[in-house]
């Protein structure tokens, strides 16, 4: 029904949304800047009961070990059921990667407010990788992608990290399918970590079902002070993220 991002400098907004039935499912370390101070956010969601019971994809999530704690936290909230753990051991075709790099293209659209809309493509394919750059707070978010191979994703991630370095990015995030352990593992190997699990995040038109996604993010700097409600603190504790209490 609804999702939101709440500040962690104080628990007021978290409390107001929790009264409405919104639960914390993800942690965004050092994502935002308020009053010139770097600050973390938490993500909250609320569902219609039939969404989880009737329209959630019936496939069993397949997760890498790094995503397990995020899933277990959400399972405590919504009784998600079974899952499989995977340790993907894949070999990339670097000859193919070299050819894909030669066919790589990117576009940047900057609006009047300074927001940058980045688009990555590989010529001759339908693959893409897009994200929003907010220079005022040095983050990349709203990342979406489609690839037909791990090699394509590898090329996109190379360029994504290059863009992060060029723009002095402090925080970036991406939602990765809970049914794609190879994608999860590749993001992990590029420095991203699972810090949330969102049931029914993406609608699959073909299957007429909502699919679960894992929240992966990257951040730099010492974590700012935070005031969390018990559910949010429980997630942060499970993730073993060290933050300063207020």
Image: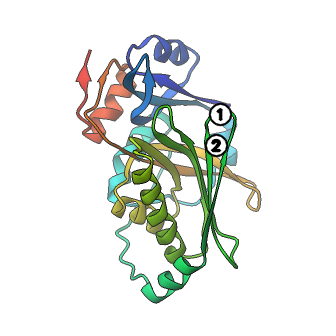
Q: Residue furthest bottom?
A: 95
Q: Are marks 2 and 1 in contact (CB under 8 Å)?
A: yes
Is 157 placed left or right of 53 in the picture? left
Please provide percent x and percent y for residue 6. Answer: 49, 23
Locate residue 204: give its quadrant: bottom right
Foreground of the two, 142 or 56: 142
Which of the labelled discs sits on residue 163, or is there none?
A: none
Which of the labelled discs sits on residue 49, or is there none?
A: 1
Q: Residue at x 46, y 89 (%)?
A: 95
Please provide percent x and percent y for residue 83. Answer: 44, 57
Instruction: State the residue position of label 2.
Output: 53
Mark 2 residue crowding within 10 angstroms, few (<14) / some (14–19) / many (20+): few
Q: Quadrant of the N terminus?
A: top right
Q: Residue at x 34, y 69 (%)?
A: 87
Element under label 2?
A: helix
Please provide percent x and percent y for residue 8. Answer: 40, 21
Mark 1 residue crowding within 10 angstroms, few (<14) / some (14–19) / many (20+): few
Foreground of the two, 52 or 211: 211
Foreground of the two, 153 or 139: 139
Position of 234 relative to 133 (above/below): above
């Amino acid at each position: 029904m609804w999702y939101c991002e709440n500040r962690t400098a104080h628990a007021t907004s978290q409390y107001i949304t929790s009264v409405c039935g919104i639960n914390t499912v993800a942690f965004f370390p050092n994502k935002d800047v308020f009053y010139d101070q770097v600050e973390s956010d938490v993500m909250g969601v609320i569902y219609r009961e039939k969404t989880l019971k009737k329209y959630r994809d019936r496939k069993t999530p397949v997760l890498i070990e790094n995503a397990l704690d995020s899933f277990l936290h959400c399972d405590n909230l919504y009784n998600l059921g079974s899952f499989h753990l995977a340790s993907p051991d894949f070999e990339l075709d670097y000859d193919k990667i070299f050819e894909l790099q030669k066919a790589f293209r990117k576009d940047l659209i900057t609006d009047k407010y300074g927001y940058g809309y980045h688009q990555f493509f590989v010529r001759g394919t339908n693959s893409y990788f897009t994200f929003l750059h907010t220079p005022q707070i040095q983050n990349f978010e709203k990342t979406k992608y489609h690839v037909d191979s791990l090699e394509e994703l590898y090329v996109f991630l190379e360029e994504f990290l290059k863009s992060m370095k060029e723009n002095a990015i402090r925080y970036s995030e991406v939602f990765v399918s809970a049914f794609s352990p190879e994608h999860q593992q590749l993001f992990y190997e590029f420095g991203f970590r699972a810090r949330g699990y969102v049931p029914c995040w993406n609608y699959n038109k073909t299957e007429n079902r909502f699919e679960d996604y894992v929240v992966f993010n990257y951040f730099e700097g010492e974590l700012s002070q935070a005031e969390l409600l018990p559910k949010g603190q429980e997630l942060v504790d499970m993730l073993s993220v060290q933050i300063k209490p207020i």
